[in-house]
Amino acid sequence: MTIKVTPLSDALGAEVTGVDLRERLSDVDRKNMEDAFIKHLVLVVRDQELNPRQYMTATRLFGKPMRQYFSDMILEEQPEIVVIDSREAPLLPNGEPRLVGSGAWHSDHTNTLQPPKVTVLYAIVLPRKGGTTGFANMHMAYDALPEDEKVKVDQMRTVNTLGKVINQVSTADLEEFGKPCVHPLARTHPVTGKKAIYVGPVKVECIVGMGQDESRRYIRELQERVIQPDIIYRHYWKPGDLLMWDNRSVAHKAFRDYDHMEGRIMHRIILEGDVPV
Ligand SMILES: [Fe+2]
């Protein structure tokens, strides 16, 4: 089987066809997929029919799964898989569901010292309409900054905690994942050496040396300026889609434009990454 890689936008994302992830990939296909991932940052493989064990085996080809902080959402038979089910979302005081999947542009698990290099989602059930996900190329976001601001951003460090998620995790998860950690606001990709703006805003306590309000305002305004339509790919999900993105250089956001009671179920795996530098 020889894979084919077709770009999905000018900025990032590619669809991989000619692959059945239930079967073992040839060394050539695996290398081609790895190269395509580094080049396009988001890979989509449609029409996959994987049980949890096959999903796990396929994903392991790209790295080592790591524990996620939603222990109570773990799939019993494969504890590295977290089940994100919109129908299970607890309600906020205003009656709105507290959905997993931030509506703000972010990287995943930025509250950990060694955040994941890759996040993988496998679409199980989808609402009839909406429930799309946006992906932004944060290398392009960095490159768009004026030179003097690049110098400024290069020196900034964010202090990260569980943030608002703190109310959604168990005591044990809080113990393991609740310690603050510091990351560069612009990180260097360990494979390509390119810089990317790297942030999960809801988990940023502050930028080192700046007050909380000022830090959050700066990050919000920075994202608004740099995350423009020309650096975004928006994915319209179908059941059986397996999508993986480079969490080091891609920001993503969930569009909550659907009826959460209809059910949107994703199986998520994250793969171990480096300490950001
Ligand atoms: Fe996320």
Image: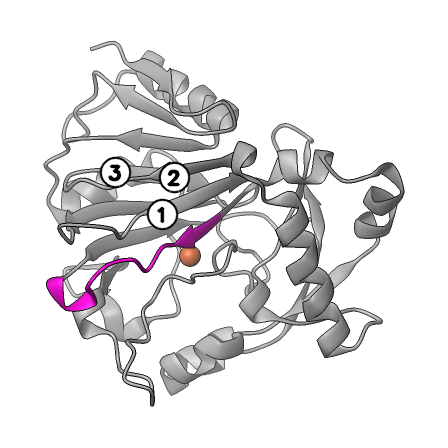
Labels 3 and 1: the sequence-earlier one: 1
Measure the alpha-carbon separation of dots 3 and 1: 13 Å
Magenta residues span 252-262
Given residues 247 and 125, the one toward you in this image is 125
Tag 2's secondary structure?
strand
Point 38% across, 35% down: residue: 62
Q: Can residue 168 be seen by looking at this rendering?
A: yes
Q: Label for residue 234?
A: 2
Q: Which residue is mark 1?
A: 133
Q: Magenta stretch: residue 216 in it?
A: no
Q: Is residue 241 left or right of residue 71?
A: left
Tag 1's secondary structure?
strand
Q: Can residue 276 be seen by looking at this rendering?
A: no
| Residue type beneath disc 3 | Leu
Q: Is residue 29 above or below residue 226?
A: above
Residue 259 placed where, x, y %?
Answer: 19, 64
| Residue type beneath disc 1 | Thr
Instruction: Work out which residue is located at the far top of the displayed protein and give it.
Output: 2
Q: Magenta stretch: residue 258 in it?
A: yes
Q: Is residue 95 above or below residue 192?
A: below
| Residue type beneath disc 2 | Arg
Q: Which residue is mark 3?
A: 242
Q: Is residue 16 left or right of residue 231?
A: left
